[in-house]
Amino acid sequence: MQVYRTPDAAFELVPDFGWQPAYAEVADPDGGTLRMAYVDAGPADGPVALLLHGEPSWSFLYRHVIRVLSEGGVRCVAPDMVGFGRSDKPLDQRDYSYARLVEWTRELVFDHLDLRQVTLVGQDWGGLIGLRLVAEHPERFARVVAANTGLPTGDVDMPEIWWLFRRAVESAEELDVGRLVAAGCVRPMADDVRAAYDAPFPEERAKAGVRAMPGLVPTRPDDPASAANRAAWATLSAGELPFLVAFSDGDPITGAMAPVLRELIPGARGLGHPTIENAGHFLQEDAGEELGRLVADFMRA
């Protein structure tokens, strides 16, 4: 497997993200290893929040959430998915699959970090991966926060705006990652913040994961990930983990999933599910401090 590793110098000007990265090795399918990066912030003995980002962002997206939670005594673990952030980036799109992304994350958070009594906070692909982990390893989790995410099986079509996004990513000669993230926000984004989302990808060839991810979302009933996701739905809809649905008011991609999750997940019933106002798909960027306070209150409750 050919891999790109972003030079450390690419991250020197990233603003407001002073936590030092940690690293762990996870197995690649060719018998080698890949380096995964993660931030581990807050008290080591505090309750654990696992903060999983999505496409095409990285752990930088959670900087405001991390600050609020860690100041409140929560240990925050925020990985970079393989292909993103400071993690290694396989150069062939065929090296990415939904199953591999789940397994790489599982290996990091359970085998390497041995996290237990975890509060999952998953947005976008962070939910697609995280909800699979919750369903397949429920003994490791204490509660779930689903934020602008879902668990598609391919039995229901994705919204047209998502198909437009997928076609744009697949067809672009050059991908402007910072622009993609900014387009998923409703509040203005400073130039240095936008540059921070570009930082992991100083070369076009490093964006194989960004290009591959939309094609890994199950969009037909016989998708390679559909059966596993249906099994996850069956487990989640029979479980009792407290499940907070914290969506924004401005996400046309995942917005329709909020009432589905509230209705079908037993642990969601009876909770006061917030709607974060004036926030888009990347609600951590638009309203990170507010999301952080909601997660902190949920963990205390």
Image (cartoon, helix red, strand yellow):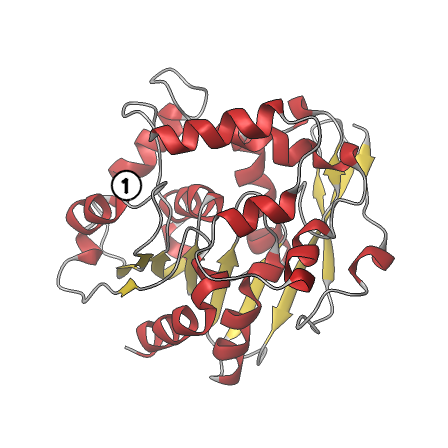
Q: Quadrant of residue 252?
A: top left
Residue type marked 1:
Thr
Using residue 139 as the reference point, say whether residue 261 is left or right of it.
Answer: left
Is residue 116 visible to the viewer in this orientation of the structure?
A: no
Q: Locate residue 148, reporting x and y percent.
A: 37, 50
Q: Locate residue 265, reporting x and y percent.
A: 21, 49
- Pointer 1: what residue? 235
Placement of 278 over or under 233, stated as above or below: below
Query: Residue placed at 71% from the left, 32% from the top?
Result: 174
Task: Quarter of the image for the N terminus: give it.
Answer: top right
Using residue 131 as the reference point, say whether residue 194 is left or right of it.
Answer: right
Query: Residue placed at 28% from the left, 37% from the top?
Result: 233
Q: Locate residue 186, reporting x and y percent.
A: 43, 56
Query: Residue placed at 34% from the left, 53% from the top?
Result: 250
Query: Residue placed at 31% from the left, 24% from the top?
Result: 157
Is residue 65 visible to the viewer in this orientation of the structure?
A: yes
